[in-house]
Image (spheres, rainbow, N blue to C red):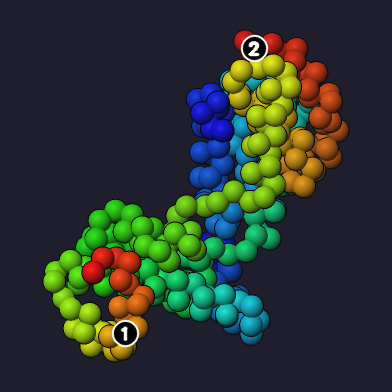
Amino acid sequence: MFERFTVGARTVVVAAQEDARERKQAKIRTENLLVSLYRDQESAAVALLREAGVEFVDVEAEVERLASEDSTPDAGKLALLGIDFEEVRKAAEETFGPGALERTQAGKQRRMFGHIPFDESSKKALELSLREALRLKHKEIRSEHVLLGLLHAEGGAAHHILAAKGVTLDGMREAVAGLGEAG
Amino acid sequence: MADATAVAAAASSKDPHVGLAAVAALRGLQEALEELQVGNARAQGWSWAQIAGVLQVSKQAVHKKYRRLGN
């Protein structure tokens, strides 16, 4: 699916993973995608969000609040035992090379060592961004389609953050359609 | 730092969920490290018996668990 994403939209997805990691979340959630839309201030998605009265600070505050409710990832749990996971990783990589822990079966199964998976809602939102692009007969998935996907994915926090600001899927669809392919 | 506060709070909590999850994370780390070490030992020509001896487990157990790493 990602082959259809523009560079801009891919950047949003990568930024969402970084955002989830920085907030020490176990999974990437829709609100991480939403806040990452603001990485590129020049993007159509940001223009649409601003027009709808949704500013970065509002989203950021909400994301921060939700992150504090998230379950602690493995590195955090190990810290409870007095183990500094980053030190263990460093030692393992010095001996066995970069990504050594991630390559083991346990590393893959637990996804404990850096790779953060998408949760159900954010996966759904990304799938829906493809569907929204197809619906508008747009060939590429751009950041504004990711925004539509986030609005469409009703189970996600991004949907609720936007709905609370009065942003609707239908209204945003119209706005995105108005941009045309060039937007 | 928020992290340290959270850690301190959790460490002093008697919530089984917190403690058990920490142990599970530790087991995951232990498994990963064991696989790296066993793979390295095999690559250096160690026998399963030698590896089992140092790991303090049975030869059968270590072979069954890690034969997927290659002979």
What residue type is disc 1 on?
A: Gln
On the image, the x and y values in percent for residue A136 come to 73, 18
Check the residue under mark 1 and report the chain it is in: B
Task: Give the quadrant of residue A106.
Answer: bottom left
On the image, the x and y values in percent for residue A150 come to 71, 36
B39 displayed left or right of A65: left
Q: Secondary structure at mark 1?
A: helix
The residue that disc 1 covers is B60
The circle on residue A5 is: none
B9 displayed left or right of A176: left
Front in this rendered view, residue A78 or B23: B23
The residue that disc 2 covers is A181
Quadrant of the snapshot with the N terminus of chain A: top right
Position of residue A10 relative to residue A113, above or below, is: above
Residue at horizontal 70 percent and vertical 12 percent from the top = A179
Q: CA distance from mark 1 to mark 2?
A: 63 Å
On the image, the x and y values in percent for residue A113 come to 43, 59
Front in this rendered view, residue A123 or A14: A123
Quadrant of the snapshot with the C terminus of chain A: top right
Count of marks overlaid on the render: 2
Residue A23 visible in the displayed image: no
Q: Residues within 10 Å of mark 1 (few under 14, many from 20)?
A: few
Labels 1 and 2 touching (C-beta < 8 A)? no
What residue type is disc 2 on?
A: Glu
Q: Secondary structure at mark 2?
A: loop
